[in-house]
Amino acid sequence: MNLRCFLPCLALALAAPWNLAADRWPEAVVFLEQHCFHCHGPDEQKGRLRLDTLTAPPAEDDTWLAVLEAIETGDMPPRAEPRPDPAAADHFVGLVSAVLAEAAGPPPIALRRMNRVEYEATVHDLLGIDTPLADLLPEDSRTQGFDNVADGLGISAVLLEKYLEAADAAFEGVIRRIEPLPAETRRAEIMQVSDNQQSVEQNRGGVIEVANSMVKFTPGWPLVRINPAHPIEDGVYRGRVAVWPHDPSDRTLVVAIFTGPLYGPGQRHFQGMFDATGTPEDPRIIEFTASMRAEESIHIIPWVFPEHITWRHGDMEPRPGVGVVWAETHGPLDQDFPSKAQLALFGDSDTIHMAEGNPVWMRYRRGVRSHYVDSTEPEADAERIIRDLVARAFRRPVPDDMADPFVQLTLGRLENGHTFEQAVRSGFTAVLCSPHFLLLNQDPEVDDYTIASRMSYFLWSSMPDEELLELAAAGRLSDPAVRSQQVDRMLEDERSERFVSHFTGQWLDLREIDFTTPDGRLYPEFDELLQRSMVEETVRFFRHVLDHDLGVKNFINSDFTILNERLARHYDIPGVTGHEEFRVVDIPPDNVRGGLLTHGSILKVTANGATTSPVLRGVWVLDRLLGIPVPPPPSGVPAVEPDIRGAESVREQFTQHTRIESCARCHDRIDPPGFALEQFDPIGGERDYYRSVGEGERVPLTNYHVGLPVEPHGEVWDGHRFDDFPGFRDWLAGQHEQVARAVAHKLLVYGTGRSVGVMDRDAVDALVDAVRGDDFGLRSMVRATVENELFHRP
């Protein structure tokens, strides 16, 4: 919206009861006179918007908010129109924002429910279990980019049913029904295993026998599996695999280890990627610990680089592969019976015991009986268990009358003839489905317990620990110095990986990394190892910036990144050996890498698999790094379809598209960053031409052709011209304060769990000002988020 639109509404504005100081409103009047009338007045209404009839707040707030957003982001006036002085525009937005805030009245309270990942983490930390729960609950919708924001977290009857199901699964995860066997080792040598007890690719020359090993050459799936090494009952196991590299040439070969079902569908759990070193006589012994179910196997997947796989190898030509010698499992390691989680919930009491139940069929054991929890004093034990659970689950001191209904429900089950365990299960489920457990920020006043929970759900996605609750009980979390100390302590705790994972997963769209699969004809070098390495780089880069309180300008450009060998080769950065270890690497001066926009993960999630789109990438840069959300395209305007045959350039396609008047204004902002990022392909490789499956000369030993040249030049909306991506990045680096503001906005949304709009601009400004002296350090921004007025608002 153009600011030359406000004069027609000036009379209304002057007459409106806005309670704005009379000596300040004339300043707004002058600004309106200079920048609004001729575009949206009685004579012309660009964009079908007429503001001379716009009434004062609180009426038509949505229009006012849209106008202010357009002014604040610089979307209006258009580039061809005279631009207002930035300070004057900022002052005007501040005045009208204050009016809107006053008209809107007190902001809504920050009451919200846990999202499903918070629910799972909270239950795990509360009970000491690792039972998967999040997938039992519906996916949460995202608001302002995050799934922990109150506006997107509704409650329905269906959701409550799912909470009952999840609570029941959690209760079952507490109790170990069968006494475990003593730990044993199950080992299998691959050359001593019959063909029907192993899974390897035998056709197309994919496997050979060497000494005591089976060597697999083809990358990725299908996998190698040695079935006799599987566990015979559920538990925690130590897995070991012996591997070695066959003709590795100048590269380090790598294997991925998964655990999962022997056959058929089912989730396989990634245990890590490991370098294959050693020899057939002295192989590398890979070791890991994982929860495994009976008959689940270790799945060994050699990741031989696709670039190793050349066309038409000669029979005697050396080929790299990974030799697998043997595999074993040892366990179960968790021998506790009853389980530690059961003792924590039920208590280690002489009156509580495990009683034998019905016989259970097990393939590898005979005469096994299930067990259930019983008590010699059921009423007293049941009340003690439920009251103790309520006190911990509700994350603050609980008066007796709040716990009484849960106790009475449990005792009522006993009176009606249910067993002790059944009665406790009923009370337990009721507690975990209670609003006092599911909802955050319930109390109308923000006390130390509220602060403890807000800090823990911000940085741990879970409940406060004992130290936070003790500080809350002592009233010490009202002290900013104590809060700052706790932020540092919490960020050093392993639970802070949840913050890093969930925040980057949504802010940077890393959760979408599997959404597209690159076209194998165009990008044969892409594999799962490369994708996992991409995500690791970005997550570890964010963690490094956070741990060392580096400025957010590193998100724009940095002289380092965090790589393994696979990704370093992809980026053409020499001197990095090994895949399982990621390390800080200085970027050579002549290399284009540096900053988030050169990360393969970001470049992949902003592409569609076959090709790239300046629109997707341009919108991503505007929203994620500059804090300029882009409205959806006008209805009826077709999207620009990629031309993978290479007959028409991207720039030609967009030139035609932006001739549509309704498209041109937004594309004036979207296209420049999008064109700059055309320097990178859908898998993050640097390029100077497009790959095609039709036009152009075929590239030797591939299925793709040399397409049209890439044209990464452009002109930013402020008139700055650039020739390539580094030129655009130099301009973006000059906007580092705007980037800091965008990051501050994202942290406030995520950290407070509430929408942050134009009327909250003072809170965003305060956060940015608080860290200006720290060069906008990321860790300082996290501390400042906890100190921000929005964080402490009811």
Image (cartoon, helix red, strand yellow):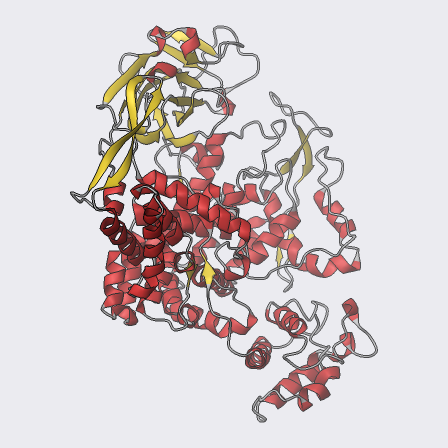
* Residue sitting nearer the eye, 306 or 350: 350
**What x and y, as percent, mark residue 532?**
45, 36
Decide which of 427, 129 is in the foreground and name it: 427
Instruction: Note whether 247 is above or below 291 in the view shown.
Output: above
Q: What residue sits 60% from the left and 20% below the top?
A: 701
**x, y (%) of residue 249?**
41, 19
Q: Quadrant of residue 553?
A: bottom left
Q: How many numbered marks have been drawn onto this rendered protein structure?
A: 0
Whether residue 283 is visible here, answered yes or no, is: no
Between 233 and 83, the one lying in front of the other is 233
Q: Is residue 174 visible?
A: yes
Name the image quarter holding the C terminus: bottom left
Q: Is 368 positioned to the left or the right of 682 in the image?
A: left
Q: Residue furthest left?
A: 350
In the rendered view, tell whether residue 536 sits above or below residue 507.
above
**Rendered residue at 36%/69% (across/down):** 787
Image quarter in which the N terminus is found: bottom right
Would residue 504 appear left or right of 18 to someone viewing this image? left
- Please tell me which residue lies in front, 776 or 133: 133
Q: Is residue 7 left or right of residue 491?
A: right
On the image, which quarter does residue 484 sit in?
bottom left
In this view, 623 is above or below 641: below
- The location of residue 129, given as percent across then percent down, is 32, 42
Looking at this rendering, what residue extends furthest in the right direction? 43
Outermost residue to the front = 416
In the depicted structure, whether residue 150 falls above or below residue 4: above
Residue 123: % across, % down: 36, 48
Q: Quadrant of residue 320?
A: top left
